[in-house]
Amino acid sequence: MDAIILQILNGLDKGSAYALIALGLTLIFGTLGVVNFAHGALFMIGAFCAVTLSRILTISHTVIDETKTDFLGNPLKVDVPYLYDIFGQATGDVIIDWAVPISILFAIPVMVGIGFAMERGLIKHFYKRPHADQILVTFGLAIVLQEIIKYFYGANPIPTPAPDAFRGSFDFGAMLGFDPNTIIYPYWRLVYFAFAAVIIGAVFAFLQFTTFGMVVRAGMADRETVGLLGINIDKRFTIMFGIAAAVAGLAGVMYTPINSPNYHMGMDFLVLSFVVVVVGGMGSLSGAVLAGFLLGILESFASMAIVLETLPGINQIIIYLVAIIILLTRPRGLMGRKGVMED
Amino acid sequence: MGLNKKDVTLLIIVAILCLFAPFILNPFPEGSAMAQFNAGYPDLMQRLVIFGIFAIGFNILFGLTGYLSFGHAAFLGVGSYAAIWMMKLLTMNVIPAIIISVLVAGLFSLLVGWISLRRSGIYFSILTLAFAQMSYSLAYSVLTPITGGETGLQPKVNDPRILDGALAAGETPRANLFGLQMNESYEMAVGGWVFTFNAGYYMAAVVMLIAFYISIRIFRSPFGMMLRAVKSNQQRLNYTGLNAKPYTLAAFVISGMYAGLAGGLLVAMDTQVGAERMFWTASGEVVLMTILGGAGTLIGPVLGAGFIKYMENIVSKINKSILEQWFAFMPDGIEDLLITLVYPFIGKGWHLTLGILFMLVVIFLPGGLVEGGQRVGRLFKRKKPADDKPDGRTTPAE
């Protein structure tokens, strides 16, 4: 029992990332009808927003510390971040420590901006082109974005730690009444899951309970009629693209402490997220979220030692296998509806 | 040969280009400043024709039926593994290796195609992508006993090789065609030029010519017409009472076999395999080759493959000191500025150039180089534009 709970928990963080990316993909797909192969790159750029901000926060100037000396007896030179000068050392340390969560505020405008630029500058011209062309041009864009990041940040993963308060693990089993030390779970993963849940909830609430969301949903169902009613649906869809980009970016920002960001992390997640979208049902937002968590948890079950003994290597391919089975038995995916994106 | 006059001319032109490639690709004398643009060395020439085969095969699927597969590198990889096992177990002669690579890749593509072709459009692309990624992960993990995992496979001295005699002491196993070694070259020095004629290249070129001939026949056959019908309007095809699936599946398997053939040839030229050639960026590259040359045209994929592989080799070779040499005549400030601007795109930045190229082609020239050539040709001919549109890209009424 405790092993099962542990695997479910382990699957949650990856599942959250899948769900967030797949949600953004579905939003873009449902509103604009565009297959965005560059969505993984947006996730990656989000992660590098966190890296950038923590670098900006630690920009330092060198000060000679008279009280200390180095091994030669000269006065020691120490790097002092400008933040210390502004806020004092204690507050400055706290801000640097909390760089990743603060990056959320930094990443939202950046990602929305990138999303707008992408939609207005490139994707807009591809609405009427075949899906193949959309796939190809966004694929090219993904390569370009990835290489730009690689040029500026190098090819190695950059460790970006979580704030001290969330760095450890806690004994989840003891809380639930199991033996102590059976279910140990890192705090940050729980934070990530809660964060993902909030974002997903916010997107759904936004679409469900605001006038703007209602118009967007109407546009998803029948773009032409909404346009005929005198509503500028293109503008709203552009905003949705920005939101989808921000969702992917935030997923990336918060993922940095779990997995040190590198330039190809977007591509790694993208392929899986597409599979998630297909399993969930193209164009279905709830399907994307459900399938994201489902596949994340399945993946972590497949990497259990007992499973691996009987079926070696299953953890590498389980997601693809499930996708193939689902597509063969339920071609529209788990929650896909008839007539939505049939080809 | 069952071809009309125009196709025979095309085939002959390609044959002549292949035959004289060592001259054509080596226009600059050895040791001159421009010598780094020479492509007439065996390794690159082999790659040019082998990836030409790969792209020709991909074009049969994508160019004719419009099904965009994002997993073709998997077939290339499977073909390579099959070929290397033939070399380890049977003989270092390349013929059985190539035959088996085509067969195995064909079988694998039959399986993948049978499942993936149940869906069309994006679903198809994602399914093929999923299969390719699955093969890639498996090759790296569970199938390590067969694929060698991260180290890959190469023929060893003590492999069984039933048909070959025992190797002499100190001799290493080399790929050969009935004794003619693939890496054997004859060098001809004329003035400042050195031309290299490589056995492996000519074998690959002959195979490519055969593959090209077959592709012309497919394009001109009733079967090819059916595939084009699938592309222009599958629904209509269904309404006339025809089932498109066997045709698309056949096209998928044929293009999978072409990919396997390319994989087998890669092994024949350079006897080693690693799983990285199955990675999905490799699949993306063949898509780019086909699009860049012109999907749905006969010569396009060959041109595209040649262009990409040439650029890849040349661009990756340029480094900062070469750039400094080029821009040396300029004033220092401008020189430094130009070098900083160009530097990200060369050497290790090849992928950036590739990505930008990819986007530019899709945005501005969806018909590829062939269409570009036709546009330029039209400018000079001053004919009515409707006259010279042989590619038949007319969109049917919905």
Image (spheres, rainbow, N blue to C red):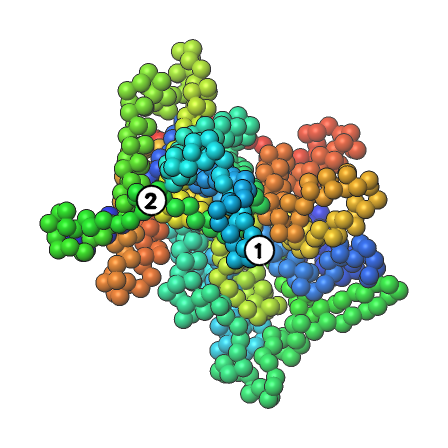
**Above or below — where is B363 with respect to B249?**
above
**Mark 1, secondary structure of its residue:** helix
Front-most of residues A155 and B17? A155
Whether residue B27 is visible to the viewer of this picture, yes or no, is no
Residue A55 spot, x, y in % from top left? 49, 40
Residue farthest to the top?
Answer: A230
Is the residue under label 2 in contact with that under label 1 (CB below 8 Å)? no
Label 1 – label 2 distance at C-alpha: 53 Å
Residue B315 spot, x, y in % from top left? 68, 51
A317 sits to left or right of A245: left
Q: Which residue does the numbered mark 1 point to in the structure image? A: B54
Q: Residues within 10 Å of mark 2 (few under 14, many from 20)?
A: few
Which quadrant of the figure contains the N terminus of chain B? bottom right
Residue at the (69%, 60%) spot, across then down: B45
* Total residue callouts: 2
Residue farthest to the right?
Answer: B191
**Above or below — where is A69 with respect to A219?**
below
**Chain for mark 1?**
B
**Above or below — where is B382 with respect to A228?**
below
Residue at the (13%, 55%) spot, across then down: A179
Residue at the (60%, 81%) spot, across then down: B172
Asked where in the image residue A294 lies, by quadrant, the reply is top left
Q: Residues within 10 Å of mark 1 (few under 14, many from 20)?
A: many
User: Which residue type carries mark 2?
Assistant: Asp
Is label 1 on the same chain as label 2? no
**Mark 2, secondary structure of its residue:** helix
Front-most of residues B176 and A20? A20
Numbered mark located on residue A164 in the image: 2
Front-most of residues A234 and A221? A234
